[in-house]
Amino acid sequence: MSTYLLLLHETPADFALLTPAAMQEIVAAHRAYAVRLAERGLLAGGEKLSDDGGRHIRSRDGRPVITDGPYAETHEVIGGFYLVRAASLAEAEALALECPHRGGGRWIELRKVDEMQ
């Protein structure tokens, strides 16, 4: 079995106008998705990422440049991730289609993890 990364893309405003009840529904849907994956032995990990945007670490002229992560005007951020186990890309795609994150401008990037030897 291979490991795949589901990167959960969203815009910063996606959740700004949601009521607390609507937000709880989303959280519950993600918890249920994670439980279903875990029960099938397919969940390798996953978390929601902090809303603070983190830091961008780059090199410029051989020197490190560290800046704040995405700002509110950013068009897109990664809001979280799941690591899943799947026998094939097709199976990983099917698991991604079960994820409650899609819709409303939100989307999932699916990447195979190359295991380090």
Image: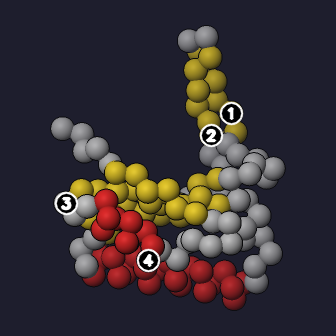
Residue 4, image x and y in percent?
A: 34, 57
Query: Residue at coordinates 66% horizontally, 49% vertically from top-left?
Result: 53
Of the 4 image quadrants, the one containing the C terminus is top left
Q: How many marks?
A: 4
Give left or right: position of 54 versus 111. Answer: right
- Between the C-alphas of marks 3 and 4, the distance is 19 Å
**Picture coordinates of residue 84, whole percent (x, y):** 33, 64
Which one is earlier in the sequence, the residue at label 4 or at label 2? Answer: 2
Closer to viewer: mark 4 or mark 2: 4
What's the amino acid at mark 2? Arg
Residue, disc 2: 55
Q: Please name which of the two marks, 2 or 3, marks the residue nearer to the observer.
A: 3
The CA span between labels 1 and 3 is 38 Å
Q: Residue furthest top?
A: 61
Quick one: SS at disc 4? helix
| N-terminal label among 4 and 1 | 1
Q: Is residue 79 visible?
A: no
- Distance between the Cα atoms at labels 4 and 1? 35 Å
Q: Amino acid at mark 4?
A: Glu
- Where is mark 1, residue-wise? 67
Q: Which residue is mark 4?
A: 98
Percent position of residue 75, x then y: 74, 51
* The N terminus: image quadrant: bottom left
Q: Are marks 2 and 1 in contact (CB under 8 Å)?
A: yes
